[in-house]
Amino acid sequence: MATTKIEWTESTWNPITGCTKLSAGCKFCYAEVMARRLKAMGQPKYKDGFKLTLHPDTLTEPYTWKKPRMIFVNSMSDLFHKDVPIDYIQKIFKVIKDNPQHTFQVLTKRADILRYYDSEGWLDWPHNLWMGVTVEDSTVTSRIDCLRKTKARVKFLSCEPLLSPLPELNLEAIDWVIVGGESGRTPRPIKEEWIIEIKEQCEKAGTAFYFKQWGGTNKKEAGRLLQGKRYDQMPEMVTQEELI
C-alpha cells in the first residue's frame, strides 16, 4: 500500500503494473511517466518499466491493513486489460471480499471486457468494491452502458481528463461522477461550461458529483474550486451488515 495525492481516495494498491494505450485519455498517461521514473530509480517492481506485469506477492498486503481506508486498486494499470488472466482478477476480488473493513475502488477503460466477464458470471462482487469506468470524451460513452449492466453495487464514472462536453449522459444506476482537467507539461484544455453541464446532470439524476481539479501545468495553483465552491460528494458508505 502507498499513500496517494489522488483527492478521491486515500491509498493505492497495485497487484498489477503497466498497461497499453487504448483511447484519447491515455495520450499523456501519468502512470506511464511514473513507471519510467521508478524504473530509473531502480525500483524492482518497475524493472520492466510500463510493461504489463502481475505481482502476486502483493495479494496478501490488504490483510495486514487493519485501519479502514479507501483504496484505489491498480492506479498504475488496468485490472481489465486483455492480458490479465481472469483467474488473477478473481483472486483480487477475493482479497477485496476478505477485507470488508476497507472500500476498494477499481477504474477501467476496458468496459467491454468488464461487461463480458460479469455476464459470464465470473465476477463475485464484494459489497465494498466500487466499480468505475473512464469517460473522457463523447466517443466513449458506451462504456457507461457496459458498467450499468454489471452487478457492481456502486458504479462510478471518472471524466478525467475531460476532453469534450458530455451533454447527454445517461446516469441511470450511476452513483458517482468524478470530473477533472488534464495536468502535466502539455495538458489539453478543459472548459468550465463542460463541468457545469455535467454537475447539473448529476443534480438532476441524484448522482454524487466530485470536481477533482482544473489541472493545467500547475494543478496545485489552479486548484479545484468550481464557481468558488468545492464539490466533494461521494457515494454513501454502507457495510455488509446494513445490506442484510
Image (cartoon, grey):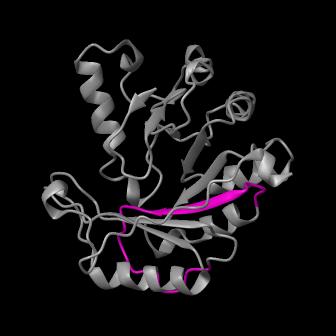
Image location of residue 244, percent across then percent down: 86, 51
The answer to which quarter of the image holds residue 64 is top right
- Decide if residue 81 is in sight here: no
The answer to which quarter of the image holds residue 60 is top right
Instruction: Please tell me how many numbered marks the rendered image carries.
Output: 0
Residue 61, compared with residue 90, is above or below; it is above
Instruction: Report the residue at 68% width, 45% height from top.
Output: 128
Instruction: Report the residue at 23% width, 61% height from top.
Output: 215
Residue 32, compared with residue 53, is above or below; it is below
Magenta span contains residue 162: yes
Left or right of 126 in this view: 229: left
- Decide if residue 3 is in sight here: yes
Q: Foreground residue, 125 or 183?
A: 125
Q: Which residues are magenta?
A: 150-170
Q: Foreground residue, 46 or 8?
A: 8
Residue 36, compared with residue 241, is above or below; it is above
Instruction: State the predominant SS element of the stretch in magenta.
Output: loop
Image location of residue 217, percent across then percent down: 14, 56
Residue 238, compared with residue 166, is above or below; it is above
Left or right of 157 in this view: 37: left
Magenta span contains residue 236: no
Instruction: Report the residue at 58% width, 56% height from top.
Output: 132
Image location of residue 172, percent across then percent down: 68, 77
Left or right of 205 in this view: 30: left
Instruction: Report the residue at 86% width, 46% height from top.
Output: 121
Left or right of 5 in this view: 62: right
